[in-house]
Amino acid sequence: MAIVIDTRPIKSEYRLDYYTGRNHCMNKSKCEGSHKGHLCVLASEERFEEIMALTAKPRFICFNCGRVANSRKNLCNPMPLTEKR
């Protein structure tokens, strides 16, 4: 069995930012509702114990930054991690 390595350059919209770890295709920022209580705000305030509780059983992902949370109210641009049936 041969191993094939794709040597094509990665498209810039799929690269991760070296400093933030954010995917460049997620940079189209928008925020639903009040920004208070969002994980990005809590992280900037270094409230990590609270973040751990809010991310223990993630059901949503932020399309802006890629963070996950139990509730959509803690993300700026949430979308479900799984499709509804």
Image (spheres, rainbow, N blue to C red):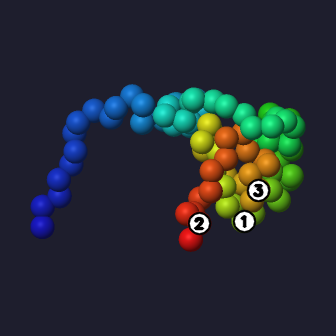
| Mark whose residue sits in front, 2 or 1 | 2
**Image point (50%, 31%), residue name:** 24
Label 1 element class: loop
Q: Residues within 10 Å of mark 3 (few under 14, many from 20)?
A: some
Earlier residue among tags 2 and 1: 1
The foreground one among 19 and 31 is 31
Q: Which residue is mark 3?
A: 71
Q: Which residue is mark 2?
A: 84
Q: Residues within 10 Å of mark 2 (few under 14, many from 20)?
A: few
Q: Is residue 29 visible?
A: yes
Q: Which mark is residue 57?
A: 1
Q: Is residue 33 left or right of residue 5?
A: right
Q: Is residue 46 visible?
A: no
Q: Is residue 81 left or right of residue 9?
A: right
The picture places residue 76, in percent across and down from the top left corner, at 72, 39
**Image point (59%, 66%), residue name:** 84
Earlier residue among tags 2 and 3: 3
The picture places residue 42, in percent across and down from the top left corner, at 83, 40
The picture places residue 55, in percent across and down from the top left corner, at 74, 57
Find the residue positioned furthest to the left.
1
Q: Amino acid at mark 3?
A: Ser
Q: Which mark is residue 14?
A: none
**Image point (23%, 36%), residue name:** 8
Determine the CA span between mark 1 and mark 3. 9 Å
Instruction: Identify the image quadrant of the N terminus.
Output: bottom left
| Mark whose residue sits in front, 1 or 3 | 3
Q: Residues within 10 Å of mark 1 (few under 14, many from 20)?
A: few
Determine the CA span between mark 2 and mark 3. 15 Å
